Image (spheres, rainbow, N blue to C red):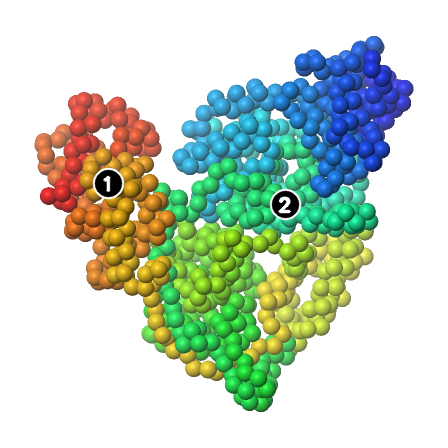
Amino acid sequence: MHNLCNGSEVNGARPAKGSNKAIAEWPTASGPADYALFAGQQLVGFVEAKKKAKDVVSDLGQARRYSRDVQIVGEESFVGGPWGEYKVPFLFSTNSRPYLEQLKDKSGVWFVDARQRTNHPRPLQGWYSPDELLGLLGQNTNAASRRLLGEPKDYLGLRDYQETAVEKIEAAIDRGQREILLAMATGTGKTRVAIGLVYRLIKSERFRRVLFLVDRNTLGEQAEDKFKETRLEELHTFDQIYDLKGVNHVGLEATTRLHISTVQGMMHRILYSAEEDQTPSVGMYDCIIVDEAHRGYTLDRELGETELLYRDQNDYISKFRRVIEYFDAVKIGLTATPAPQTVEIFGKPVFTYGYRDAVVDGWLVDHDPPHQIETKLKQEGIKWKQGDTVPVYDPATGEVTNLEDIPDEIELEVDHFNRLVLTENFNRTVAKELVKCLNPDGDGKTLVFADTDDHADTVVRILFEEFANIGVELDDSAIRKITGSIDHPQQMIRRYKNERLPNIAVTVDLLTTGIDVPEICNLVFIRRVRSRILFEQMLGRATRRCDEIGKDHFSIYDTVGLYEALEPVSSMKAVSPNPSVTLEELADEFDEMLGDAVDPAQLKRQMEQILAKLQRVLRRLEGDDLEQLRTLAGGQSLQQLIDSLDPADPAGFRRQLSQRRGVLSFLDENRARANKQLISHHEDELRSHTRGYGNAEKPEDYLSAFKSFIIDNLNRIPALAIVCQRPRELTRQSLRELKMALDQAGYTEHSLRTAWQEWTNEDIAADLISFVRRQALGDPLVSHDDRIRAAMQRVLGLQDWTAIQRQWLERIEKHLLKETVLDREDFDKGAFRAQGGFRRLDKIFQGNFAGVLQEINDELYRQETA
């Protein structure tokens, strides 16, 4: 009970001002309590202590009895109440055994807040501090919930679905839910939701302090920047209103309301603090928000009954889970791609706003039907017959040797290309087709996913050569490899994000997540991906809108049969409980540990792990790789780097590592490369370049299937009937329902446009309504913009409008060009609302604005219904 009473456990003592005590054998009318907890002279709690074999939770009954039967006999005092039959609010029971889920009733510190009858006992990983108990006492969750319910959201500037996300989370908190998951697609503003949510929860005093957990320092810094940039009430930012501590701050103040930390940093403070009084108490935070909650977090492995007797539970419990479960806090997970282990920890999402939702609502851009590039080698594989001679490349020495007269046939599929077998001809055939489609002089950018660091070099070289072959001479910085092995990768990422060049980036893992470049319009996969979660993260690099360059979609180039290889959702598995830790991860953990002043023995073990991993790498590297490492290390060999790392000097150890991060990144990027690789000189050729239309092989088949779907569902989907029979009654909500129904059936606006263009050679930017009416009624297909402009020209010619009325009609035309429908609610939000909304417009149009809207909707479909 160290945190609880600052070390003062006294038998027969009396409470004293300015002193926190756990006083043993405190008398009550029904017998002495094992411990009475005093903050000064205020009696705040009772503890019932039992032997290890005893059930803990059932012994709270005795603590409840003491709370009912205790009497004030001296200068001590109660802290309020009574709360029904209870005079003391905070009741604990323990048997000193650390909490283990499998022994839930026989382990941990069990706690109940007796102030409300609806509060139930829950296990804690440790003890509250006296100040935290007093802070908890000062909280009135019922009053806070009422304040939260009445708190306006308009000043937050959230989109509709973001407001809904906040409302769903707050409703879950109000129901007493302590594990909450929010699923929102990449690019839809999870951090923006978190900022609004945290502000409301702190302002309403629903929570005292929030911990915002990330898994990388860079993500923590990005989150901190957003909290400091986002304007809230009266245009103030969060840090201007409340005390915020970022990832580089360890010590918290009593006034700190938000702390941003990495999982690794918090893990070391909890598990490896050099001094016990530096270990956080369980009440330090009462709300934890976990960003990117799907990333690398493992499930617990349950121990067998025999193992429980002699195995240390710490060997099996995920450190991430130990961090979030250590604190007595409401846990809120944020993710774009809920994995099974994420749901296991946080439960099912209370609100989901997926990629398709965001596309339908216009917040993210859709992709065209994927380009599927088929080559001879991709279809047939690479084969050597028995008795053939196979060239073999040794990356360690850079030498090529021949494996002669092979005893068996060798057959390698596309999965093995660029990993087990080097195939220049496959990469060149793919590149010849890609350079016909990519525009390195345009505003849109391209991101290419390669298999390994070496493969990325090959792709960059071949792309330059093939652009030159078609007469396109490029600036040397137009195409760049961006992996952890290059010099200053973060600088290159910033250039890719903020400057026109490089226009084409080739990466392996570095840019799969955590990068926001809205100008990315093309994703090229020369690497097979089996995990849908990783694939969705990769797609997320291109889904953001970029209105500055007129981006309304992005393209996918699949050269390796990507969709064939993807796992079905049902087969997603949790990551391994013992993942392979990279050198950079070990170095990051070491930085955190040194900054947190952890136990020296733990520091020593960490340094030994880094050295051992470097020694293993050294034994397998030779030739060109060693020379490249020497270049990255500024002339220093890997052995010299190892020799310079002195475990007796942790600060120097960290300094040497930080100066050689490029070396660590290079070693990590190439860990998937085979020790020896076969070299293929097999000829390759392009077989086809088609578009993926789901089950349809040709665009005309896709459009024919779309027509059948429309006719078959005309009376089943209400919004279809409205579009075809009563289009003037179309509302934003009914259009959204139609888009979602068609989307689920595989029909999107961009796919229909592409199919129409490929089939007819006509590039018509028609909207979904025009496509539906074309297939159902035979209306001519016209572009969205042409239909809107023609309709508004007819409206302008209906009568002699005043100057201000014409100005408003022109504004409505601009609105319709961006949207598809116009209804009453459009004028009571956004820019229209700021200028007076429907009521003002009704005055401007002499009380007949509803009639004007009817005329506009009539004209929008006049051509089709004529």
**Foreground of the two, 67 or 397:** 67
Residue 798: horizontal and vertical position, in percent? 10, 34
Q: Is residue 506 above or below residue 289?
A: below
Instruction: Indicate left or right for 496 with 811 as reference.
Output: right
Discs 2/1, front: 1
| Residue denoted by label 1 | 721
Total label count? 2
In the image, farthest residue toward the top: 73
Q: Give coordinates of residue 321: x percent, y percent.
A: 66, 44
In this figure, which residue is indicated by the disc labeled 2?
262
Residue at point 54%, 87% (across, down): 386
Type of amino acid at the residue the image marks with label 2: Thr
Q: Are marks 2 and 1 in contact (CB under 8 Å)?
A: no
Left or right of 493? Residue 84 is right
Question: In the image, what residue occupies the spot 60% across and 52% down?
Answer: 574
Above or below, comparing residue 431 to residue 649 in the picture: below
Q: Nearer the viewer, residue 410 or 633?
A: 410
Quadrant of the drawing holding the N terminus: top right
Farthest-out residue, right: 12
Q: Residues within 10 Å of mark 2 (few under 14, many from 20)?
A: many
Residue at 69% across / 50% down in the picture? 301
Classify 280 as above or below 24. Answer: below
Pick whichever of labels 2 and 1 is earlier in the sequence: 2
> Residue 539 placed where, x, y %?
45, 55
Q: Amino acid at mark 1?
A: Ala
Is 223 located above or below residue 487 in the figure? above
Q: CA distance from mark 2 to mark 1?
A: 52 Å
Q: Nearer the viewer, residue 633 or 31?
A: 31
